[in-house]
């Protein structure tokens, strides 16, 4: 009886993926304890978020992909409406209009779109699978650009670009022509000066700072300089857990959220970083494996997009902390403190597990 | 892209899909490798560079300011000491809106208009990354109230600071001096002198008096602490510590009680008094009346008080004993008499018949004696006792200005005494050269006449007069005047006495000195110009009165004290030493607008002697002596 319950419970769980995720998150808890200034409360709160996220992941894993398809366009439309709502009635916080008051709760619709956009695009290509034309890609591009533009306007360039990336992966995997990609790349390069002039001052500043962080060491370059000092001073084996001077003496800003990676690099050195890189690569590899064995257009596209987006998050965060990408507000997946991004991330992996296990069931 | 056929080949699609997935996976792998390379670069190849930066980030060198040395009187009574108090300090560079922050602070801690003004002045004088006090001497309630609200005020801190305090205030103002905040000009000077490092963290330095001249002894050596600091600059823990060495303590010759006696007996009068131990040159009392509260200067004086002190007609900021230059009046006569004897221009028995005036040969100008009708027959002894002007008019002319200049300059007139406080004036001893230099005029025979009675182009400082009197008392051995008696090393406790120094030994015959001394003794006895000065004393006093003219009286006019505005009245001068046979104290007193030396100045000397020699305190303070008809000069 218990064995049957256990089987039922674990039926839609991908063991390998779960193990990799859990290992990464537990490693994250260790880093977070140090990064939060040994705050047990923070670690506990993150642990609870993790449990909630795991339950939601389990629930979504149990949902057959065809059911997921049904909620694709409603969630997309809802997200789009909420984004419009934000643009019109949103609440301004830290100079950006990102939040919407719904009764008592404040919601950030761009979070929802991280899942809803790839779902919508995958659903669209699934519908058009039998007769895909160039015009379908144009329609998909519009479906993608609408939310991206609204989010970029908030302004939240980081999230906009990441959602654009997740959508682009769907287009890419759906078979958008190489020539089109090349064309897009060229026109993007041509468009760059125009985009520069449309950017907000602080966005321009971030890019300038990336080119030369010492230009403004106390202003916008401060984050980058301090995180590079943290990483560099960590050396090969690090200063030891809880011994990071950059982190514990407050030189490192946002050290338990966006810049938590610098704490890892300072205290555990290159060795610790390589452990995390390997864990991330294991998750990505497993995701790609699941994707390549997915049976339907929809599941392939959604699984591929989720996996690649995960890799993109990790890359962008680590790139920004090590000073090769501009500072954009992107958390380090599975490690940074914050429940929302953890839930969004694990919901994605829930879908991935669903794709993996329901395929197996079909086979059986 | 070409149009695809309606029905697609499932296997081929899957192949294409997997190919694309492989491409994407490879790109992801490549990017992660790129990151790994970046981390290897930062953490292996640039490790040392960033290691250094991290150390610089976290370690800062914090100076520990040494305790300033104490200044004590000869009995160990503190004239300048330190105490710890809490101050509320603002670092202007860390504050966005200074005015608003101060307003908010004033709801927690009392900040008066004066505090604001003083802070504004400090702000103008300082570099804005310095921590500047807005309020000093916080009480416990204020400290508690601010601490509870501290989170609201980044850049505002409570600091425990050592404060300099002058417990004697006005009484010792000009001798002890004061410290003041170090300004930009001082910093440049310190840098030039190579003292900059030792003054890191020090906010104050000596500005006047002993505080200034003994700055190097009093300051001490700054210690250093290597502390780990966080990004906000707050110290987290100490890594190493080099303790500071406190400044050395100064013990003076000065006797505070004696100084207080002088203060008391001066009463409402302005003036100066210097008492010297003739055998050592040690300064026993150094009075400048009125003084000022030096404590006002410690935190930086506010404009209102400054204006008040600066513009006061009583000139409290004037260091009278060494900055005040006055005509010596008749107090010059004992020295003139010595010159006459030494240079064989007079014998003790040489007598003149004083008609009440003196005339240069071939001139009708009358140089008047102070006593109309004259003193009759006057020899050297009597000339001093009754202060005969006519005697000295003739003596001066017989000596000639060059002889007078040479003889008197041996006593230190016209030269700085070299006392251990800065800013001394040299006075003016008349000579042919000095008149030419100052007035571009030749010396006339008539100029010499009034030099004989200490008027004319004759200016001395009370300090010079005291040194000359002490030299007279010490058988012509001139001791270097000195305020500091010994310096105590604060670390080892070792006391180094400052050896008395002979400034000059004047070759004066003892019998001539005795003649002058005996006359000076009779000055203080009935019949002398200070007839009551030694009344009832168990020791003998040798003295000489003097009157320094403030306004010249025209030929044919008479000086009537009651008709002259108070500030145009003559200054009273008195020099004395006691006990006359074996002097242990010599005094010069100048009472501004005090009238006659015998009346106002001599009683002060008597009170000083009574205390110093007998330990007797004056009966009552501030009793102005009755004018005495007989005393004049």
Image: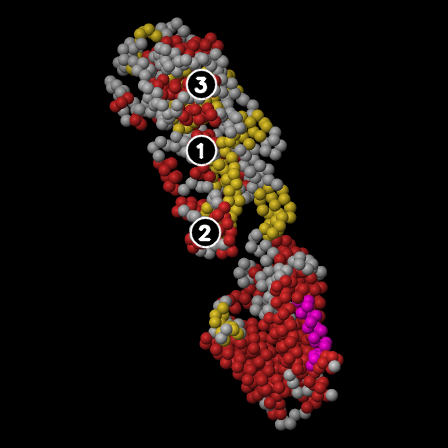
Q: Is residue A90 above or below residue A41?
A: below
Separation of disc 2 and disc 3 at Cα? 55 Å
Q: Nearer the viewer, mark 2 or mark 3?
A: 2
Residue A101 appears in view:
yes
Which label is found at residue A6? Answer: none
- Check if mark 2 and mark 3 are on a common chain: yes
Tell me the subunit letter for badge 3.
B
**In the picture shown, does residue B322 fall above or below A107?**
above
Q: Residue at x 47, y 18 (%)?
A: B614
Q: Which mark is residue B108?
A: 2
**Where is residue B208 shown, x and y percent of the image?**
46, 34
From where the camera sits, is residue B546 visible?
no
Q: Quadrant of residue B379?
A: top left
Q: Are marks 2 and 1 in contact (CB under 8 Å)?
A: no
- Residue at 61% x, 88% y is A126
Magenta-highlighted stretch: main secondary structure?
A: helix
* Mark 1 or mark 3: whose residue is earlier in sequence: 1
Q: How far apart are the alpha carbons under marks 1 and 3?
A: 25 Å
How many marks overall? 3
Q: Can you give x and y, in whole percent of width and height, for residue B264 in the image? A: 40, 26
For label 2, the crowd category at 10 Å Cα-Cα, with few meaning under 14, some 14 to 19 and many 20 or more, is: some
Q: Which residues are magenta?
A: A9-28
**Image depth: mark 2 or mark 1 in front:** 2
Q: Which mark is residue B610?
A: 3
Q: Residue at x 66, y 60 (%)?
A: A266
Mark 1 residue element: helix
Q: Residue at x 51, y 42 (%)?
A: B85
Residue labelled with disc 1:
B169
* Sequence-first disc among 2 and 1: 2
Quadrant the N terminus of chain B occupies: bottom right
Subunit bearing disc 1: B
Of callouts 2 and 3, the N-terminal one:
2
């Amino acid at each position: 009886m218990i064995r049957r319950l256990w089987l039922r419970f674990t039926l839609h769980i991908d063991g390998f993926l779960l193990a990799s995720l859990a290992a990464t998150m537990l490693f994250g808890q260790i880093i977070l304890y140090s990064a939060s200034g040994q705050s047990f409360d923070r670690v506990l709160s993150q642990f609870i978020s993790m449990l909630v996220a795991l339950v939601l992941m389990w629930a979504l894993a149990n949902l057959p992909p065809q059911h997921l398809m049904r909620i694709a366009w409603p969630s997309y439309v809802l997200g789009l409406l909420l984004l419009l709502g934000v643009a019109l009635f949103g609440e301004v916080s830290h100079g950006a209009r990102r939040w919407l008051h719904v009764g008592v709760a404040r919601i950030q619709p761009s979070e929802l779109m991280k899942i809803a956009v790839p779902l919508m695009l995958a659903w669209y290509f699934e519908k058009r699978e039998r007769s895909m034309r160039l015009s379908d890609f144009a329609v998909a591009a519009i479906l993608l650009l609408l939310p991206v533009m609204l989010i970029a306007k908030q302004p939240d360039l980081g999230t906009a670009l990441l959602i654009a990336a997740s959508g682009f992966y769907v287009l890419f995997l759906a078979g958008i022509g190489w020539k089109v990609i090349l064309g897009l790349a060229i026109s993007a390069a041509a468009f760059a000066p125009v985009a520069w002039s449309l950017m907000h001052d602080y966005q321009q500043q971030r890019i300038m700072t990336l080119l030369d962080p010492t230009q403004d060491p106390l202003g916008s370059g401060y984050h980058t300089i301090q995180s590079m000092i943290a990483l560099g001073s960590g050396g090969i084996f690090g200063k030891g857990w809880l011994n990071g001077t950059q982190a514990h003496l407050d030189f490192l800003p946002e050290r338990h959220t966006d810049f938590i990676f610098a704490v890892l690099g300072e205290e555990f050195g290159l060795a610790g970083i390589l452990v995390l890189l390997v864990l991330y690569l294991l998750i990505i590899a497993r995701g790609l494996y699941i994707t390549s064995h997915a049976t339907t257009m929809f599941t392939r596209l959604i699984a591929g997009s989720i996996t690649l987006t995960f890799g993109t998050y990790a890359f962008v965060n680590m790139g920004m902390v090590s000073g090769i990408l501009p500072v954009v507000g992107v958390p380090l997946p599975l490690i940074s403190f914050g429940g929302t991004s953890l839930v969004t991330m694990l919901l994605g992996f829930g879908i991935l597990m669903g794709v993996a296990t329901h395929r197996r069931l079909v086979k059986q | 892209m070409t149009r695809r056929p309606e029905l697609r080949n499932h296997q081929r699609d899957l192949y294409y899909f997997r190919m694309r997935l492989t491409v994407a996976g490879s790109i992801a792998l490549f990017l992660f490798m790129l990151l790994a390379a970046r981390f290897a670069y930062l953490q292996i190849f640039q490790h040392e560079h960033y290691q250094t930066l991290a150390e610089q980030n976290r370690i800062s060198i914090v100076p520990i300011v040494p305790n300033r040395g104490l200044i004590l009187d000869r009995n160990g009574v503190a004239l300048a000491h330190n105490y710890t108090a809490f101050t509320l300090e603002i670092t202007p560079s860390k504050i966005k809106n200074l005015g608003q922050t101060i307003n908010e602070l004033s709801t927690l801690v009392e900040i008066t208009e004066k505090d604001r003004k003083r802070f504004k002045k400090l702000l103008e004088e300082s570099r804005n990354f310095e921590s500047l006090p807005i309020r000093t001497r916080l009480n416990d309630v204020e400290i508690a109230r601010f601490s509870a609200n501290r989170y609201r005020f980044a850049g505002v801190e409570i600091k425990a600071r050592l404060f300099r305090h002058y417990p004697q205030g006005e009484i010792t103002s000009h001798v002890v001096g004061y410290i003041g905040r170090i300004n930009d000009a001082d910093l440049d000077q310190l840098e030039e002198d190579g003292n900059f490092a030792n003054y890191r963290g020090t906010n104050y330095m000596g500005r006047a008096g002993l505080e200034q001249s003994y700055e190097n002894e009093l300051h001490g050596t700054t210690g250093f602490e290597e502390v780990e600091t966080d990004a906000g600059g707050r110290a987290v823990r100490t890594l190493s510590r080099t303790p500071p060495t406190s400044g050395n303590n100064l013990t003076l010759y000065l006797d505070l009680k004696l100084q207080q006696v002088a203060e008391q007996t001066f009463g409402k009068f302005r003036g100066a008094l210097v008492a010297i131990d003739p055998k050592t040159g040690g300064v026993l009392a150094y009075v400048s009346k009125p003084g000022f509260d030096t404590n006002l200067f410690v935190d930086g004086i506010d404009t209102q008080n400054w204006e008040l002190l600066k513009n006061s007609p009583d000139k409290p900021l004037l260091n009278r004993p060494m900055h005040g230059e006055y005509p010596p009046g008749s107090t010059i006569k004992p020295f003139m008499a010595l010159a006459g004897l030494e240079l064989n221009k007079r014998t003790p028995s040489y007598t003149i018949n004083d008609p009440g005036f003196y005339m240069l040969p071939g001139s009708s100008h009358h140089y008047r004696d102070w006593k109309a009708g004259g003193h009759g027959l006057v020899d050297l002894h009597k000339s001093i006792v009754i202060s005969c002007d006519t005697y000295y008019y003739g003596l001066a002319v017989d000596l000639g200005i060059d002889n007078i200049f040479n003889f008197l300059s041996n006593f230190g007139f016209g030269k700085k005494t070299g006392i251990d406080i800065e800013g001394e004036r040299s006075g003016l001893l008349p000579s042919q050269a000095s008149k030419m230099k100052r007035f571009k005029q030749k010396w006339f025979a008539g100029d010499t006449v009034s030099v004989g009675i200490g008027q004319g182009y004759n200016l001395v400082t009370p300090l010079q007069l005291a040194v000359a009197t002490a030299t007279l008392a010490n058988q012509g051995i001139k001791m270097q005047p000195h305020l500091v008696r010994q310096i105590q090393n604060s670390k080892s406790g070792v006391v180094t006495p400052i050896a008395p120094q002979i400034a000059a030994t004047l070759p004066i015959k003892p019998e001539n000195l005795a003649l002058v001394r005996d006359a000076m003794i009779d000055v203080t006895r009935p019949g002398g110009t200070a007839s009551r000065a030694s009344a009832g004393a168990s020791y003998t006093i040798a003295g000489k009165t003097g009157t320094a003219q403030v306004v010249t009286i025209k030929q044919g006019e008479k000086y009537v004290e009651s008709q002259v505005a108070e500030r145009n009245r003559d200054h009273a001068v008195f020099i004395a030493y006691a006990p006359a046979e074996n002097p242990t104290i010599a005094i010069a007193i100048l009472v501004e607008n005090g009238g006659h030396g015998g009346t106002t100045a001599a009683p002060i000397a008597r009170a000083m002697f009574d205390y110093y020699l007998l330990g007797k305190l004056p009966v009552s303070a501030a009793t102005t002596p009755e004018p005495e008809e007989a005393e004049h000069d």
